[in-house]
Image: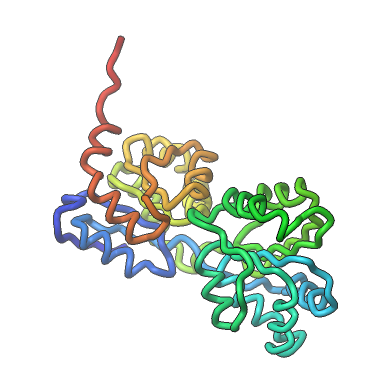
Amino acid sequence: METARTSTGFAGLRVLSLESRRAPEMAKLIATFGGIAMVAPSMREVPLESNTEAQRFTRDLLAGGFDMVILLTGGGTRSLARVAETVCSREEFVAALQRVPIVARGPKPVAALKEMGLPVTLAVPEPNTWRELLAALDGNRDALPLSGRRVAVQEYGAPNPELLAGLAERGANVRPVPVYEWGLPEDSAPLRQAVAALAGGEVDVALFTTSVQVVHLLKIAGEMNLQEPVRQAFSRILVGSIGPVTSEELRAHGIAADFEPSHPKMGILVNEVAQRSAELLARKRSPVPSN
């Protein structure tokens, strides 16, 4: 865990983040806005031991087996391209993708496609959830019909059943393409310390930047027999969520998100939570008036 304090936004509140890849940046942001940063990496990206599904997708794509490809993440797009090179050349893979409409869920897969020189047929607007993706397709149904079309969906971390069901309801023949999955960090000590801090009332603000963080935090809490104390602790902790998908995951585990930023960006989340932390935390911790 990391500890630092400057500025006035959080005014010395103890702020927990479960960020992994950008943990140092998150710790610095929290400190910049006056918080005491507790950063506990909660996940790592693990390549699938067998990429047979991605390889099969590549072979079928080369054979003209798809009418649309939906790419959900930048990292997954790049991983998919690397797996494809075990089947064909990069040039052949790019040429095959050029022959089908490509739907990108937000700026990260757009950037990954740009690196390959590939245009995007449809870019999904913020906050880039499966709801916006389906709405964007509905709004372009004449140019991008789904009924009877063979649609490949690059998955990230875990399947998105709502998206797959929504595509199927619109008549698409959907093929999920798993490229990687999320695993617990190799060193789980910081995450275990975070669980203990939550259960012990040592956290004032918790920031979640992906739904997988919620799952892994409660998994470790369960292993420590502290899942219920951790859930109860959130009744007095200000919970900041990066966006609707993460908020849904929190609700699924009985935890309410108190704040979502104006845009689903890490820096904006920290800034906006910091500016309102005193007000929101006081409201959450105030006694409920009796009738």
Asked whether the viewer can see residue 63, the reply is yes
- The residue lying toward the viewer, choosing from 175 and 31, is 175
Up/down of 194 relative to 225, above or below: below
Q: Quadrant of the C terminus?
A: top left
- Residue 141 % position (x, y): 71, 54
At 40% from the left edge and 50% from the top edge, which residue is drawn?
195
At 14% from the left edge and 58% from the top edge, which residue is drawn?
7
Quarter-of-image position of residue 255: top left
Up/down of 137 relative to 122, above or below: above
- The residue lying toward the viewer, choosing from 222 and 37, is 37
Quarter-of-image position of residue 63: bottom right
| Number of residue marks | 0
- Residue 179 % position (x, y): 66, 69
Asked whether the viewer can see residue 223, the reply is no
- The residue lying toward the viewer, choosing from 130 and 279, is 130
- Residue 100 % position (x, y): 74, 72
Please, which colouring scheme is shown?
A: rainbow
Residue lying at the far top of the rendered structure: 291
- Residue 92 % position (x, y): 74, 87
At 80% from the left edge and 79% from the top edge, which residue is drawn?
62
At 83% from the left edge and 71% from the top edge, which residue is drawn?
65
Along the horizontal axis of the image, is 250 left or right of 180? Answer: left
Along the horizontal axis of the image, is 157 left or right of 257? Answer: right
Along the horizontal axis of the image, is 15 left or right of 131? Answer: left
Q: Quadrant of the N terminus?
A: bottom left
